[in-house]
Image (cartoon, rainbow, N blue to C red):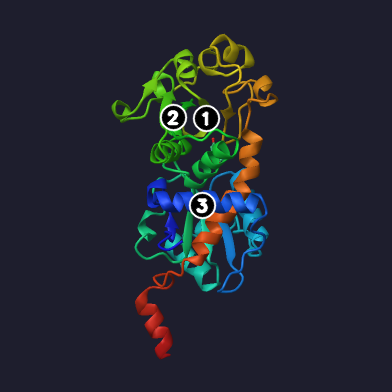
């Protein structure tokens, strides 16, 4: 896929064609039509520089590169970033060691942005603060499609802590780009800042009645302003999904997605997690195939603009 970005920071970095290409390739990996990938430049190497907690994203990237026949090495938690080394020097070090891709997760928004013009190595956003989480949105929409819930012409009700969710931002962009509608459902205090530009309601009933697919978000307490108290009981009463509420609002069979991890009993009741409605484990399964597709496509794009700054490479060849 020509012109695939060397830095995947947000959904708008991808064209419609590139998104479709990723969906097709994920499907092929899933159905074993594409087994092992042949990389022309040798065995690719990937690491995950995660400065925030993760189970699913980190493990699925490491599994994906290994399934492709590449090499995964864990980024040290006791790295020199803790000695004050800046991110650019760290990434140039990874590049000099032969890494092809680094997946970065950070609590800082836009952390990959400065590397877009001249990336030290290929970079994937594994979640930046309240910014974006493009690979999560891609695997979610891929899962919806695989399960017969194609978003084109459909409304996806995204319920929960919208204000602090990078997943919501990437999903909104991707679903719109693929011809679907998003209806955000959130308490007043978690409405996004530019809420006048989006479809938004504070009512779960209205969301269920107008949605074809539900996507629930974790209450992300770690990103909340410490001065603001979270009214857990009120949230559960108004927004937590249970089988009873799905039935009460006339949508007993609606599919329910969640990126994980779930606060069981808060955004979802346990009966939903164990029901046919819940698609969270399918999302986790598919995350491997989508991330294989992203890695394979990114590696194939032979971007000459990657690596050490020009001055350094010239000096290196003179000496
Ligand atoms: C999400 C994340 O970290 O942004 N989870 C994930 O990647 N599977 C959502 C979340 O943490 O709530």
Res. 86 in view: no
* Marks 3, 2: nearer the viewer: 3
Residue labelled with disc 3: 22
Residue 159 location (% of width, % of height): 49, 25
Q: CB under 8 Å between callouts 1 and 3?
A: no
Query: Cα distance, mark 3 to mark 2?
Result: 26 Å
Classify mark 1 as within 8 Å of ligand 1 or not, answering yes or no.
yes
Q: Is mark 2 within 8 Å of ligand 1?
A: no
Residue count near mark 1 (Cα–Cα under 10 Å), binned few <14, some 14–19, many ≥20? many
- According to the picture, the residue beneath numbered tag 2 turns out to be 162
Name the residue nearer the viewer: 135 or 179: 179
Camera-nearest label, 1 or 3: 3
- Nearer to us in this view, 85 or 138: 138
Quadrant placement of the C terminus: bottom left
> In terms of secondary structure, where does tag 3 sit?
helix
Residue at 63%, 25% in the rendered image: 277
Q: Residue at x 64, y 58 (%)?
A: 34
User: Which residue is at 52% across, 62% downward?
Assistant: 101
Quadrant of the displayed image that contains ligand 1: top right
Residue shown at 66% from the left, 50% from the top: 31
Extreme residue in the bottom direction:
319
Name the side, left or right, on which 18 lies relative to 250: left
Tag 2–tag 1 contact (CB < 8 Å): yes
Residue 64 in the image: state x and y as whole percent: 63, 55
Residue bearing the label numbered 1: 217
How far, Cα to Cα, is label 1 from label 3? 24 Å
């Amino acid at each position: 896929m020509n012109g695939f970005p060397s830095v995947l920071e947000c959904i708008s970095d991808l064209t419609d064609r590139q998104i479709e290409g990723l969906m097709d390739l994920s499907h092929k990996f899933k159905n074993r039509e594409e087994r092992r990938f042949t990389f022309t430049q040798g065995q690719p190497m990937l690491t995950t520089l995660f400065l925030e907690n993760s189970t699913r994203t980190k493990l699925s990237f490491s599994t994906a590169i290994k399934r492709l026949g590449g090499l995964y090495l864990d980024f040290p938690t006791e790295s020199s970033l803790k000695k004050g080394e800046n991110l650019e020097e760290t990434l140039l070090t990874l590049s000099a060691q032969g890494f092809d891709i680094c997946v970065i997760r950070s609590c800082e928004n836009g952390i990959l942005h400065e590397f877009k013009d001249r990336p030290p190595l290929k970079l994937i956003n594994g979640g930046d603060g309240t910014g974006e989480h493009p690979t999560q949105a891609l695997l979610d929409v891929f899962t919806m499609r695989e399960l017969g819930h194609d978003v084109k012409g459909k409304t996806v009700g995204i319920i929960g802590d919208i204000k602090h969710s990078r997943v919501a931002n990437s999903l909104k962009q991707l679903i719109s780009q693929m011809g679907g509608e998003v209806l955000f459902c959130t308490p007043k205090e978690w409405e996004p800042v530019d809420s006048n530009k989006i479809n938004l309601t504070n009512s779960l009933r209205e969301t269920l009645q107008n949605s074809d697919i539900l996507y629930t978000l974790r209450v992300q307490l770690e990103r909340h302003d410490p001065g603001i108290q979270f009214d857990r009981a009120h949230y559960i009463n108004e927004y937590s999904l249970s089988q009873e509420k799905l039935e009460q609002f006339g949508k007993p069979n609606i599919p329910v997605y969640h990126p994980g991890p779930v606060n069981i009993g808060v955004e979802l009741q346990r009966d939903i997690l164990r029901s046919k409605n819940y698609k969270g484990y399918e999302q986790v399964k598919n995350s491997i195939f989508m991330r294989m597709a992203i890695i394979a496509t990114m590696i194939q794009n032979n971007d000459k603009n990657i690596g050490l700054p020009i001055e350094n490479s010239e000096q290196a060849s003179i000496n």
